[in-house]
Image (spheres, rainbow, N blue to C red):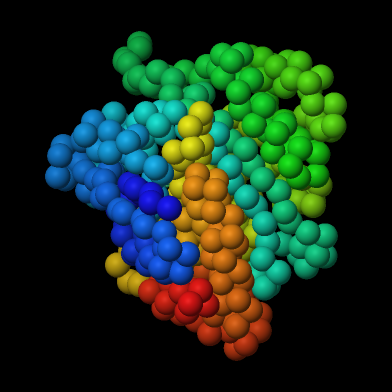
Amino acid sequence: MQKKIAVIRGDGIGPEIVNEALKVLDVIAKKYGHTFTYDDVDMGGNAIDKWGEPLPQAMLDKCVNSDSVLLGAVGGPKWNSVPGDKRPEKGLLKLRAGMGVYSNNRPAKIWPQLADASPLKPEIVEKGIDFIIVRELIGGVYFGKHETNVVNGEKVATDIMNYSESEIERIGRIGFETAQKRNHKLCSVEKSNVLDTSRLWNATMHRLAKEYPDVELTDMLVDNCAMQIVKNPAQFDVIVTENMFGDILSDEASMITGSIGMIPSSSLGKTSCGLYEPIHGSAPDIAGQDIANPIGTILSAAMMLRYSFDMAKEADDIENAVSKVLDKGYRCGDIMPAHNADKCTKVGCSKMGELIRQELI
Ligand code: NAD
C-alpha cells in the first residue's frame, strides 16, 4: 500500500521523537511491502520564525491533502511573548479545525511492566487502569471568542464557550460507539450544576442514549471525575467530554499510567485522514538532550496504521515491540521506577527507538 504522510516535527523535543517514529514506520514499510512517503510541514514556533505565522495556509493544505498527519509537539518559551492569535498553539487549533478532526481519542492504559511507575498505590493500580477519553476537539472555549478590554480602568479578559446540539451529538455518538466496541460503559463528564453548555451536553447525551440501549450511560461532574480518576480509575471504560475538560482530565489520566511520555492519541473526523500525536507538549526543559521518551509518538504512528490505513497487523507489531522492550527492562528517564530501579536500564530517546526497531526486524 502507498501512503503519503504529512509530518510535523514541531518544536522542542518534537523533531527528536518524530524522527524515531518515522524510522519505525520505515521498518514496517520494508517488512510489509508498503511505501510511506513523508511530506514535511512547518507548524508552531519554527513556522513563526520562518513564515511569520504558526500554520501558513499552504502547510495546512499539505496536511488536508495527505493520507494522514503525524505530529510531534509545538510551542516553547521562545514564543511566549508572541500575541495570542499568533502563538504556536494557534497553529495546532487551526490544524485540528482545518482537518475537521472533532474526535480525539486518548487511551489511559497501564502497561503491566510500568505498574511501579504509577504514582498511585499498588492496591489501586492492581484493580486495573484501562479506559479511553473521547474528547471533543474543535469546539468549546478553545474555539470561542477571546478578548481583553479595559473596563472601568482595569483589564477584563473574556473567553466564550459555546456548543451547539449538533456538535455535542456527533462526539456523543463517537462515545457510544467506542463503548459498544469495549465494555459498554460510557461516562459523560460535564459541569451541569453551573454551565448551560453542560446542561445541553447532558440533555443531548440522554436523548442519544435511547438509540444505544446496550450502553450503560452515567453522568459525572468534571470536578468529581478528576477525583475519581485517582481514587478508583478501574470504574471507567469510556469517558466522553468537551474540549477543555478532556484536555485536563487526559493529562491527569496519563500520569496515573506512569508518564505523559507514553500516551498516544488519534484525532478523526468524517474522513480517514487523521491526526496522530502524543498527548504531551514540546517539553522544552528536556529538548535537545536525547532523553525524551519517544514511545507516545511511536504508539501514535501505530494508531495511524490501525485507524487511518486499516493495517491492524502492522499496528499490533509495533505495540508488541514496545511491550517486549519494556519486558527487557529498558526505560527512558520518565518511566524509571521509584523502587527497584536497579532492575531497569535507563536509555535515551534514540536508543529507545533503536531497541523498538530491533524487536520489529
Ligand atoms: P509538556 O507536556 O511539554 O511537559 C510537561 C512535563 O512532562 C515536562 O516536565 C516534560 O519534560 C515532561 N514530558 C513531556 N513529554 C515528555 C516525553 N516524551 N518524555 C519525557 N518527559 C516528557 O507540557 P508543558 O511544559 O506545559 O508545555 C510545554 C510547551 O508545549 C508549551 O509551549 C505548551 O503550550 C506546549 N504544548 C503543546 C502541545 C502540543 O503540541 N500538542 C500540547 C501541550 C503543550
Q: Nearer the viewer, residue 167 or 82?
A: 167
Q: Nearer the viewer, residue 270 or 349?
A: 270
Task: Residue 137 in the image: state x and y as whole percent.
Answer: 51, 32
The location of residue 304, given as percent across then percent down, is 49, 50
| Residue found 52% across the figure and 57% down from its top | 302
Q: Relative to 74, is 335 on the left or the right? A: right
Q: Is residue 17 visible?
A: no
Depth check: give the residue in front, 240 or 197. Answer: 240
Q: Residue at x 51, y 74 (%)?
A: 360
Give the quadrant of residue 213: top right
Residue 248 lies in quadrant: top right
Look at the picture and state if 316 lies above or below 275: below
The correct choice, above or below, for 261 with respect to 94 in the image is below
Compared with 108, 287 (above or below) is below
State whether residue 147 appears in this view.
yes
**Percent coordinates x, y for residue 54 in the rendering:** 25, 38
**Residue at far top of view:** 152
**Residue shown at 22% from the left, 48% from the top:** 46
Q: Position of residue 352 (x, y in %)?
A: 46, 75
Count of numbered marks: 0
Identify the residue at image location x=65%, y=52%.
108
